[in-house]
Every structure is written in structure tokens, then in C-alpha cells.
């Protein structure tokens, strides 16, 4: 919305503040939500949903305002507002339904799909809104950097665990190099792709660009959680074995790297054999890390091997892949 209709006036700022209030309310409800899930029974998501509804109602106001001042795209703006409103009615009804975790997950997935209907119709069937491709990519890039901060926090936790357990040692250095190297490699992997140029050439695929990023962000955060799991393992406070702990890092990193390539393939409508080769090499690196863990090699060395996965992707792109991307962009502009 901001890319298309950020007027930066007092109304827009107050609406933004209302969204911030919604975020705070949602965050305050997370402990009781997780507690209810842990203890079984019904899911206590009332405060979380209330905060989310506050956030989304603010967006309804924003879209209605945009519809008033942009007659050319009024139908698209009203479509956004309509489906957001329908979804919020569903969320409010969901609060009053005391259900099990499984049923609640089904309700949440249904309402998420309802939330997605509006953007899909507005952007693909009604001419869309005047967002700027480079601005959108910049925002997603900034969000990626914020999420990668979780990897830095996980590195600190792992490094602290090693230092507390063994003091400063070669293994401590390996943990530090692995954590920071992995985070840096993931950052480079994301930003090496010219996503702004691709999105600019294929605006009609913005829906996929936006929502596939949910998996990208989730994988980044899960990687940070995996590094925390490694810290618990090193401190002997984990119920996970060595292999399971390494997999807690390998799986999200694998999902992340795969999603970067999936985004490229979806946006350019091409599947390049060179990318398949790079993914195969990345998988081989992951397999080696798991085998080393199974053989009893230290966690620091296993994580150091995992760090090589994004390196394979980055080197492959810098050596050869950038030429493929440049040609793909030229082809997109010619279509």
C-alpha cells in the first residue's frame, strides 16, 4: 500500500500509529496463545486476533481513502477493502469458537486464503495499483535483513555456549565463523539476484513474489532458531541428538536457498539447468554435514560445513549465473 499511496500526511501517520497499536496488542497475546496450545484444550487466541483486527481495520481505512482519491483504480482499492473486511469478520467470529489446535489451524488457513483473495483479484483482474517495483523489492530486502538478525542472535547464543563450556578455543572460533558466515552467505544469496529488474518486467506476478516471501522469511527465522538449538546442544541442555541438531539448521537453510531459486523460476517462468546443478551441490554439502554429525564430528565442524551451502550458490552466480540472469531479464523485456 505504501508504495502506491503513501501520502505522508497526518491521516496516513495516524493510521500507521493505529497499526502499531495493533502490533503491540498482538504481541501481548502471544504468551497466552502458546500457553493454551502447550496445555491442550482450546486455543486462547482472543488477544492475538484482536490485535490483528486492529491492524487490518486501519488498512481498510487506508484503502477506502485511496479509492476516494484515485477514481481510475477505485475498483481495485475497494476490492482490497472488501476482502480485508470479510476476513476480519471471520477472525472476530473465530474468537468466540473454542476449538482444538487442529480445527483452529484449519480456520486460520481458511481466513488467510480469504485475506489473499483481495490482492489477487485487485492486482490480476482489476488493473492493480501503482506500486513501484524497485520500492517493493527494497522493502522486502530490508525485511530480509531484519530477519537475518535472528541468525546473528543465534550465533551469539552458540558462541556464548561454547565459551562458557570450554573457554576460548578453536571450536569457539569455528562456531563464530560458521554462524556469521552462514548469515552473511544467506544475505549475499538473496541480494545477488536482480529481483527489482525482474519484478519491474513482470508486474503481473507480484502476487507470487509477495506471498512466496513468507516461506523465505520463515526459513530465515527458523535458521536462527536452529542456531539456538545448536547452542543448547553444546551446553548439554538439549534433548536432540547431534544429527537432529544439525538438521535443525540444515533444513531451514535448504528451504531458504531453494525458495530464492523458486522465486527466480516463478518470476522469470524459466527453470535453468545451471540452477538445478547448484541446488544439487548445495544438497551434497548438507548431506556431508549430516554424515559428519552421524560420525561424531563436533558441532562446530558440522556447522562450518553447512556454511559452505550458500557459498556454493553465491560463487555459482558470480562466476556464471549472473550472465543467465541478465539474459533472462532481456528476454522478459522482449516478451
Image (cartoon, rainbow, N blue to C red):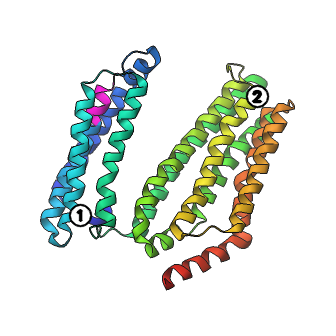
- At label 1, counting other C-alpha atoms closer than 10 Å, the crowd grade (few under 14, some 14-19, many 20 or more) is many
- Residue 10 sits in quarter: bottom left
- Residue 193 sits in quarter: bottom right
Which residue appears at 66% of the width and 35% of the height?
A: 248
Which residue appears at 83% of the width and 38% of the height?
A: 291
Q: Nearer the viewer, residue 285 or 138?
A: 285
- At label 2, counting other C-alpha atoms closer than 10 Å, the crowd grade (few under 14, some 14-19, many 20 or more) is many
- Residue extending farthest to the left is 68
- Residue 106 sits in quarter: top left
Label 2 sits on residue: 242
Q: Is residue 135 visible?
A: yes
Residue 174 horizontal/vertical position (percent) = 78, 40
Which residue appears at 25% of the width and 39% of the height?
A: 53
Q: Nearer the viewer, residue 312 or 150?
A: 312
Assess whether residue 47 is covered by the magenta stretch. Answer: yes
Label 1 sits on residue: 76
Q: Are marks 2 and 1 in contact (CB under 8 Å)?
A: no
Amino acid at each position: 500500500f505504501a508504495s502506491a499511496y503513501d501520502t505522508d500526511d497526518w491521516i496516513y501517520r495516524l493510521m500507521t500509529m493505529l497499526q502499531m497499536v495493533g502490533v503491540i496488542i498482538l504481541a501481548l497475546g502471544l504468551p497466552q496463545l502458546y500457553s493454551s496450545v502447550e496445555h491442550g484444550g482450546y486455543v486462547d487466541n482472543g488477544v492475538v486476533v484482536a490485535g490483528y483486527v486492529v491492524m487490518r481495520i486501519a488498512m481498510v481505512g487506508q484503502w477506502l481513502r485511496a479509492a476516494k482519491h484515485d477514481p481510475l483504480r477505485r475498483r481495485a482499492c475497494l476490492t482490497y477493502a472488501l476482502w480485508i473486511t470479510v476476513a476480519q469478520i471471520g477472525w472476530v467470529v473465530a474468537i468466540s469458537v473454542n476449538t482444538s489446535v487442529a480445527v483452529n489451524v484449519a480456520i486460520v488457513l481458511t481466513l488467510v486464503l480469504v485475506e489473499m483473495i483481495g490482492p489477487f483479484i485487485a492486482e490480476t483482474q482489476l488493473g492493480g495499483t501503482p506500486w513501484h517495483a524497485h520500492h517493493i523489492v527494497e522493502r522486502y530486502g530490508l525485511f530480509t535483513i531484519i530477519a537475518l538478525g535472528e541468525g546473528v542472535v543465534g550465533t551469539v547464543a552458540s558462541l556464548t555456549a561454547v565459551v562458557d563450556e570450554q573457554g576460548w578455543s578453536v571450536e569457539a572460533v569455528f562456531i563464530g565463523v560458521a554462524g556469521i558466515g552462514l548469515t552473511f552467505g544467506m544475505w549475499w544469496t538473496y541480494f545477488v539476484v536482480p529481483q527489482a529488474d525482474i519484478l519491474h518486467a513482470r508486474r503481473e506476478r507480484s502476487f507470487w513474489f509477495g506471498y512466496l516471501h513468507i516461506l523465505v522469511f520463515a526459513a530465515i527465522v527458523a535458521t536462527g532458531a536452529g542456531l539456538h538449538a545448536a547452542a543448547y546442544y553444546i551446553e548439554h541442555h538439549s534433548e536432540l541428538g547431534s544429527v537432529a541438531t544439525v538438521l535443525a539448521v540444515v533444513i531451514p537453510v535448504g528451504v531458504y536457498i531453494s525458495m530464492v531459486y523458486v522465486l527466480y523460476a516463478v518470476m522469470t517462468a524459466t527453470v535453468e539447468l545451471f540452477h538445478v546443478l547448484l541446488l544439487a551441490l548445495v544438497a551434497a554439502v548438507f548431506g556431508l554435514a549430516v554424515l559428519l554429525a552421524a560420525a561424531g564430528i563436533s558441532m562446530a565442524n558440522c556447522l562450518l560445513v553447512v556454511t559452505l551451502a550458500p557459498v556454493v550458490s553465491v560463487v555459482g552466480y558470480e562466476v556464471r549465473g549472473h550472465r543467465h540472469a541478465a539474459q533472462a531479464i532481456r528476454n522478459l523485456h522482449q516478451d
